[in-house]
Amino acid sequence: MVISIQKANYLGKYKIKFQFSDGTEKVVDFEAFLKKAKNPMTRKYLDKKLFQSFSIEYGDIIWNDYEMCFPIWDLYEGKI
C-alpha cells in the first residue's frame, strides 16, 4: 500500500499532526531537528511563521516549493 499524507494540522511550537491515507494519525515534533540543523536554509524554519507555511502537495508535506521536505515513511513512523 502506498501511504500519503491526507491532512496536516499545525498544533503549536513545531508540532504537526498528520493524517495518512490509511487513517493513521501521528504528531511529529520538528523542534529538535530544526535546532540541530546546520544549514541556514533549514534553520530559517525556526521562525514559526515560516514553519507554519507548509502545504500538502501530491500526498507530501513541503515548505517553499520543496525547500524543505521529509520522507513520508519517517513521518508515518513519527520520527525525523
Image (cartoon, rainbow, N blue to C red):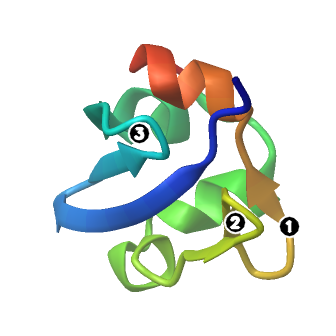
Q: Residue at x 52, y 30 (%)?
A: 75
**Quarter of image, res 9:** bottom left
- On screen, 35 above or below 8? above
Distance in Å between CA atoms under marks 1 and 3: 16 Å
Q: Residues within 10 Å of mark 2 (few under 14, many from 20)?
A: some
Question: On the image, numbered disc 3 is attached to which residue?
Answer: 30
N-terminal of the pair, mark 1 or mark 3, is: 3
Q: Looking at the picture, which amino acid does disc 1 mark?
A: Tyr
Residue 29, above or below 63: above
Q: Residue at x 47, y 37 (%)?
A: 35
| Residue placed under numbered mark 2 in the picture | 62
Quarter that holds the N terminus: top right
Q: Nearer the viewer, mark 1 or mark 3?
A: 1
User: What's the amino acid at mark 3?
Assistant: Phe
Q: CA distance from mark 1 to mark 2?
A: 5 Å
Q: Left or right of 66: which side holds 18?
A: left
Q: Which mark is residue 43?
A: none
Decide: marks 1, 2 in contact (CB < 8 A)?
yes
Q: Are marks 3 and 2 in contact (CB under 8 Å)?
A: no
Residue at horizontal 32 percent and vertical 39 percent from the top: 23
Dot 3 crowding, Cα within 10 Å, few <14, some 14–19, many 20+: some
Left or right side of 35 for 58: right
- Secondary structure beneath label 3: loop
Give the foreground label among 3 and 2. 2
Percent position of residue 34, x then y? 52, 41
Q: Are marks 1 and 3 in contact (CB under 8 Å)?
A: no
Estimate the x, y position of residue 13 in percent, counting from the top left.
19, 58
Residue occupied by mark 1: 66
